[in-house]
Amino acid sequence: MLLLAAALAAQAAPTTTPSPAQPIRASKIVLVGDSTTAVAGGWGGAFCADHVTSFVACVNLARGGRSSGSYRAEGSWDLALAEMKTPGFTKTWVLIQFGHNDQPGKPGRSTDLATEFPANLRRYVEETRAAGAIPVLVTPLTRRTFKNGQLDRDLDPWADAVRRVAAELKVPLVDLNAKSAAAVQAMGEAEADTLAQLPKGAAPAGDTTATEVNDSPFARRKLSFDRTHLGRKGADYFSAMVAHELAIAAPDTARLLYE
């Protein structure tokens, strides 16, 4: 009798079906640009590591030595477009920063400031939107070269071109050039030099004998001093600046960012 009662109770119990799995509501930030955005030597590595929440996939596709023209010509932009089209993300923002290598005198990289450079930026914006992502233009990070106590703002014309394209196409703008130039001018040359990959006067890193290099399975990173690229201190400083300005320029990103 007990077994019969248990069987009847089991048959009478309502059956429940498991609720469908909730879709992942993740966002993505893709970084496109040159060495001042790249993982090594730029602000992008620290940005992805320290300034996005766990709800964000942060993909740094910036590459050293690239201009707004050569980045596309070599196929790197095709990789970025494919990344934008990856399914499963609710929103994808694409931060685009060029200018350093678009300046004259760099064979295979230079672009014409009046025509080619803005045309390249417009095309990046249009294709980003066509891929279903949100473009954000970033003015080029300042160099840290001083002349007679004043910062040499040699990238201002390229920053102006970026601002004009952003206004024309109604694109969110992170004015990194203006913010970084003001900050570097205020801190002065000596402090600005501490932001380099190898602070001025420090012994070169990565010096090893040929035998040590050959015996190691790892690449050896050799650091040098210059006033364009960033060491850890510089990357930390400017990545926080980018995060702060991005949250203002594209308010939907604010909840996804740490300053």
Image: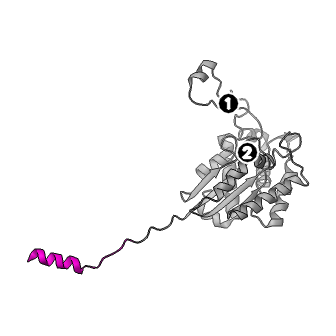
Q: Quadrant of residue 13?
A: bottom left
Residue furthest toward the bottom? 12
Give the residue drawn at x 74%, y 63%: 172
Label of residue 222 in the image: 1
Q: Of the residues under marks 1 and 2, which one precedes in the sequence?
A: 2
Residue 5 x, y percent position in the rendering: 13, 78
Residue sitting nearer the eye, 194 or 16: 16
Rate crowding at label 1 as few (under 14), some (14 to 19) or many (20 or more) other CA atoms within 10 Å: few
Left or right: 123, with 259 as reference point:
right
Q: Quadrant of residue 2?
A: bottom left
Left or right: 68, with 17 as reference point:
right
Q: Amino acid at mark 2?
A: Thr
Give the residue drawn at x 65%, y 24%: 207
Q: Let me know if residue 52 appears in the view.
A: no
Residue furthest toward the right? 114
Look at the numbered discs 1 and 2 and tell me whether their residues touch, using CB distance below 8 Å: no
Q: Quadrant of residue 42?
A: top right
**Range drawn in magenta:** 1-18
Residue 220 x, y percent position in the rendering: 63, 29
Q: Quadrant of the N terminus?
A: bottom left
Residue 250 x, y percent position in the rendering: 69, 65
Residue sitting nearer the eye, 202 or 67: 67
Residue sitting nearer the eye, 87 or 161: 87
Label of residue 125 in the image: none
Label of residue 36 in the image: 2
**Is residue 52 placed above or below 16 in the rendered structure?**
above
Residue 5 counted in the magenta span: yes
Give the residue drawn at x 70%, y 49%: 238
Q: Amino acid at mark 1?
A: Lys
Find the distance from the CA under tag 1 to the CA under tag 2: 17 Å
